[in-house]
Image (cartoon, rainbow, N blue to C red):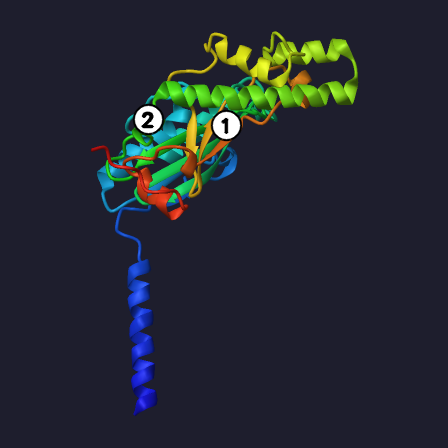
Amino acid sequence: MKQVLCAWLAAALLSGAGAQAQVAPGSQASVAPVATTGPAARFQVPQVKLPNAAVARRINQELLRLVVEQHGLENATASPRQLLTAAARECCYDELTERWRAGGNGLTELEYTVLLNQDYLLSVEFQLYYQGLNYPATQHLTFDLRTGNLLRVTDLLADSPLQLRRRLRAAVSRRLREELSQVAANYGDSATVAHVAELYQLANWNAAPARGLAEDLAAPDEDFPEHLEFALTPKELLLFHPVGMSRLDFEFLPDEMYRFPYERVQPKSLLVPIARKAGAPKPSRKK
């Protein structure tokens, strides 16, 4: 009898733990690429399913927009599969020779990665290919799964936009100057170093680190838009700052991603539960 009672208690505990671990309806999306075959399969575009069909439809339209706008496709009645088929034909089919091109024109491929899908937030990264070649700068979309709204970083952080841009500029300055120091060590060629400094837009490239950082932060910040490119993971905020350059200079291309653990920023709104799970302290309440 004692063994039966213990087994019953263990089963009850396991059942309770399983119930607690269940995902709240709508807090996580079911994500899968548009089912395509043939040339259209070059565009891997995610689509979501949610209990609220209207919210899912709003998100799916935004996810398709990246391909649709690149190829000037506007057809409200077309299905996602039809739109991607039309995009593939637009970019990569030669009407004169009636053959598919190996490269193509404009956006020719698209891949995606789901970076976060929990607690009513969905964050997706897109890798783009132009003329059949990998484009180094990624693009990102983050959604509120309750409403389908596309979010800005200021919707999720209490940090001011000015403060975020300044912190990103400081991180970019440090990385570019470190990269430039490595170029100088590897090449020992002043002409190469000067060329890379120009690519990085570092005027006083041989300044001491502290002075260089101060000069970079004092310079105009036209290259840092008001609405920063961002994405979310379960552990950290990701900000992005690509450096534009010719493919001939890609050996000097720095990583565009800058990581900010949630304890180093001020999460708000939907980001608070995720930050807590990552170990960030609770946001203080203003009295």
User: Residue 261, percent across and down?
Assistant: 45, 37
User: Residue 149, percent across and down?
Assistant: 27, 31
- Residue closest to the eye, 163 or 152: 163
What separation in Å lies between label 1 and label 2 (alpha carbons)?
A: 20 Å
Instruction: Please tell me whether residue 262 is drawn above or below residue 223 in the rendered image.
Output: below
Q: Looking at the picture, which amino acid does disc 1 mark?
A: Thr
User: Residue 1, percent across and down?
Assistant: 30, 92
Instruction: Please tell me whether residue 276 is drawn above or below residue 219 in the rendered image.
Output: below
Q: Would residue 12 be visible to someone looking at this image?
A: yes
Residue, far front? 287
Whether pointer 1 and pointer 2 mark residues with C-beta atoms closer than 8 Å, the reply is no
Mark 2 or mark 1, which is nearer the start of the sequence?
A: 1
Instruction: Give the residue displayed 65% in from the left and 22% down from the top.
Output: 179
| Helix, strand or loop at mark 2 | helix
Q: Would residue 35 be visible to someone looking at this image?
A: no
Q: Residues within 10 Å of mark 1 (few under 14, many from 20)?
A: some
Q: Residue 61 appears in which quarter of the rendering?
A: top left
Return the mark for residue 68: none
User: Disc 1 or disc 2, which is closer to the eye?
Assistant: 2
Return the mark for residue 154: 2
Instruction: Give the residue displayed 51% in from the left and 21% down from the top.
Output: 170
User: Residue 18, percent across and down?
Assistant: 32, 64
Instruction: Give the residue displayed 52% in from the left and 29% down from the top.
Output: 257
| Helix, strand or loop at mark 1 | loop
Q: Looking at the picture, which amino acid does disc 2 mark?
A: Thr
Q: Residues within 10 Å of mark 2 (few under 14, many from 20)?
A: some
Query: Which residue is tagged 1?
Result: 138
Q: Residue 265 appears in which quarter of the rendering?
A: top left
Where is the C terminus found, in terms of image quarters? top left
- Residue closest to the eye, 177 or 239: 177
- Residue closest to the eye, 178 or 143: 178
